Image: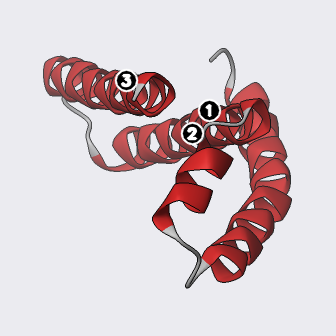
Amino acid sequence: MGSAKNAWKIHRLTTILLIPLIIYLFLRIIHFSGEPYELILEELRSLWSILFILIFTVLGLIHMRIGVNEILEDYIHDEPAKKIINFLISSFFILILIFVCLSMWLILIF
C-alpha cells in the first residue's frame, strides 16, 4: 500500500466511492422487493449489475483491508505474529473476491 499517508488517502477515497454505491444498492433492494424471482435474476445477469457488484466488492475489500491493517499496526507489536495475521487476512479477502466472482459466473451460466 505504501506509506501511511497513501493508505489514508485510499481509505478516504474508498469511503467516498462506497457511499453512493451503498445508497444505490439499498434503493435497488427496495425496488426489487416483492418482484418475481425471474425478474431479479434477469437484472442480476445484466452487465451493469455484474460490474456494480464487482466494483462494490473490490472497493469494499480494499476499504476493509486498509482498516484491518491500521488495527494490526496499532495493536499487534510482534512482527512474526503480524506477518501471519496479515497473510491470513489477505487470504480471507482473496477468498471473498473469488467467491463473489464465482457467484457472478454461476448466475451468468444458469
11 up-or-down from 32: above or below? above
Looking at the image, which is closer to me, 52 or 83?
52
Residue 12 is left or right of residue 82, and the answer is right
Residue depicted at 71% across the width and 36% down the height: 46
Q: Which residue is mark 1?
A: 54
Residue 43 is left or right of residue 23, and the answer is left
* Secondary structure category for the residue under label 3: helix
The amino acid beneath tag 2 is Thr
Q: Which residue is mark 3?
A: 102
Residue depicted at 61% across the width and 59% down the height: 39
Looking at the image, which is closer to me, 22 or 4?
22
Count neighbours of disc 3 (C-alpha within 10 A) and say few if under 14, some if 14 to 19, many if 20 or more. few
Q: Which residue is mark 2?
A: 57
Q: Earlier in the sequence, mark 1 or mark 3?
A: 1
Residue 80 in the image: state x and y as whole percent.
Answer: 15, 17
The amino acid beneath tag 3 is Leu
- Residue at mark 1 to residue at mark 3: CA–CA distance: 11 Å
- Residue at mark 2 to residue at mark 3: CA–CA distance: 13 Å
Answer whether labels 2 and 1 touch (C-beta < 8 Å).
yes
Answer whether labels 1 and 3 touch (C-beta < 8 Å).
no
* Total marks in image: 3
- Residue at mark 2 to residue at mark 1: CA–CA distance: 5 Å
